[in-house]
Amino acid sequence: MPTVSEPVPALDALAEALQRLPGVGPKSARRMVYHLLERDREGARSLTGALEQALERVRHCRRCNNLTESELCPVCASPRRDQSFLCVVESPSDIPSVEQAASFNGTYYVLMGRLSPLDGVGPEDLAFEGLERRVAEGVQEVVVATNATVEGEATAHYIRERLEPKGIRVTRLAHGVPLGGELEFVDASTLDRALTRRYPLEDD
């Protein structure tokens, strides 16, 4: 019988595996392990089964790199989506956020990352060639929805430089003071961008 202080390899291995999740450190991972094994073994079995099923079934859409169980994701396969309007995002996890806006009826392309020279991520590491093939299928406008970070901005500029010579209209998501936001809580860089991209007031 192991003593209290004696390590349990299976627990350590599970905690180490959980630390692969974003935002999960050693302490959080250890809490999850003890919760699952002490109080919710049935939940642990359910989690294991769901993860195995997802690993077996989920793949990348051959057209846009979104996650799907079919060759094409539901957006790419839908005849109701505007195929000439393309939204470029960094990750499949960004697509549900854009969909929540309910004002976009185009399709998507996932770069699977963003340019980050400091991390060794260059153009050859992202799916830019696939983007150009997708654009060649009749896309008229590409809206770049990369994150409002230094890396996201660099990626947006690279996309513009790559696509505009081909006659493609490249736009960027607007950034500024959020609807309902109060100026005293807005950071300086966001306010600076909002002032730079101000627009005239018009009647509704």
Image (tube, rainbow, N blue to C red):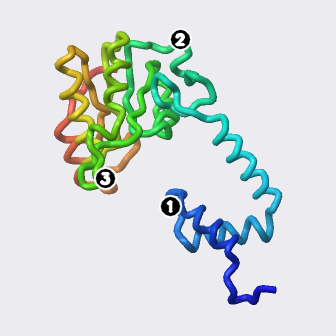
Q: Relative to residue 92, is residue 187 depicted above or below?
A: below
Q: Quadrant of the C terminus?
A: top left
Q: CA distance from mark 2 to mark 3?
A: 38 Å
Element type at mark 3: loop
> Which residue is at a point 65% across and 71% down the rendered structure image?
31
Q: Earlier in the sequence, mark 1 or mark 2?
A: 1
Three-letter amino acid code at the position of disc 1: Gly
178 or 94, which is in the foreground?
94
Q: Relative to residue 52, is residue 75 depicted above or below?
A: above
In the picture, residue 148 is in which quadrant? top left
> Which residue is at a point 77% across and 86% down the rendered structure image?
2
Q: Nearer the viewer, mark 2 or mark 3?
A: 2
Q: CA distance from mark 1 to mark 2?
A: 37 Å
Q: Quadrant of the N terminus?
A: bottom right
Three-letter amino acid code at the position of disc 3: Val
Q: Relative to residue 83, is residue 187 depicted above or below?
A: below
Q: CA distance from mark 3 to mark 1?
A: 25 Å
Disc 3 target residue: 186
Count neighbours of disc 2 (C-alpha within 10 A) and say few if under 14, some if 14 to 19, many if 20 or more.
Answer: few
Q: Is residue 135 visible?
A: yes
Count neighbours of disc 1 (C-alpha within 10 A) and say few if under 14, some if 14 to 19, many if 20 or more.
Answer: few
Q: Earlier in the sequence, mark 2 or mark 3?
A: 2
x, y percent for residue 80: 53, 11
129 lies left or right of 49: left
> Which residue is at a point 22% across and 43% down the rendered structure image?
193
Three-letter amino acid code at the position of disc 2: Arg
Disc 1 target residue: 23
Disc 2 target residue: 80
> Which residue is at a point 25% across and 18% down the rendered structure image?
169
54 or 203, which is in the foreground?
54
In the picture, residue 39 is in which quadrant? bottom right
Q: Is residue 177 visible?
A: no
